[in-house]
Amino acid sequence: MNSRGDSRLPFPTKPLVINGIEVEEYIIPEEKKGMVLKALYPFIPLPSLDEVRLDIHSGKLFKIREFRVTRELHHNWLVSPYYEEGGGTVIDWVPPDDAGDDGEDDE
């Protein structure tokens, strides 16, 4: 990423309306999902496409392979499949076992 934004991904897009604002959503072929995840996922380790995550904003579970990518403000955003209904970006995904873990014992 640079000060002008991210390079566009080599995929067609379709319009997506989020909170009344139109953005672009990339149409990513299933066979390219692993490559896109590797390019955009900002954390280590890289999860497998079959791992499950909880979108903490929507409260819903999904398989990583269900991710979507939007183009907003000259940047590519890795988002949950529930993005337009209040779901979050990749920073808002947690393993289901970590959801609600406040570090305290429940005894």
Image (tube, grey):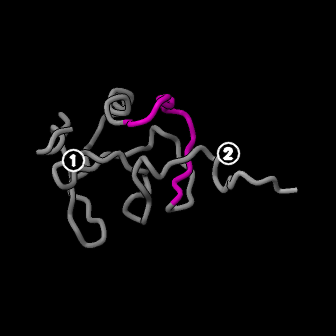
| Residue under the point 48% across and 32% down | 49
Viewer-proximal residue among 89 and 1: 1
Quick one: which residue is furthest to the left in this view? 4
Q: Secondary structure at mark 1?
A: strand
Determine which quarter of the picture holds residue 17: bottom left
Determine which quarter of the picture holds residue 29: top left
The reply to whether dot 2 and dot 1 touch (C-beta < 8 Å) is: no
- Residue 107 percent location from the top left of the image: 88, 56
- Residue 53 located left or right of residue 15: right
Image quarter of the N terminus: top left
| Residue under the point 26% across and 43% down | 27
Residue tagged 2 = 97
Q: Residues within 10 Å of mark 1 (few under 14, many from 20)?
A: some
Task: Return the mark for residue 16.
Answer: none
Determine which quarter of the picture holds residue 53: top right
Tell me which label, 2 or 1, sits earlier in the chain: 1
Span of residues in magenta = 41-56
Residue tagged 1 = 75
- Residue 86 percent location from the top left of the image: 42, 65
- Residue 22 percent location from the top left of the image: 20, 64
| Residue under the point 21% across and 54% down | 72
Type of amino acid under label 2: Asp
- Residue 93 located left or right of residue 101: left
- Residue 55 percent location from the top left of the image: 51, 54
- Residue 103 located left or right of residue 20: right
Q: Reply yes or no: does residue 47 show up in magenta.
A: yes
Q: Secondary structure at mark 2?
A: helix
Q: CA distance from mark 2 to mark 1?
A: 30 Å
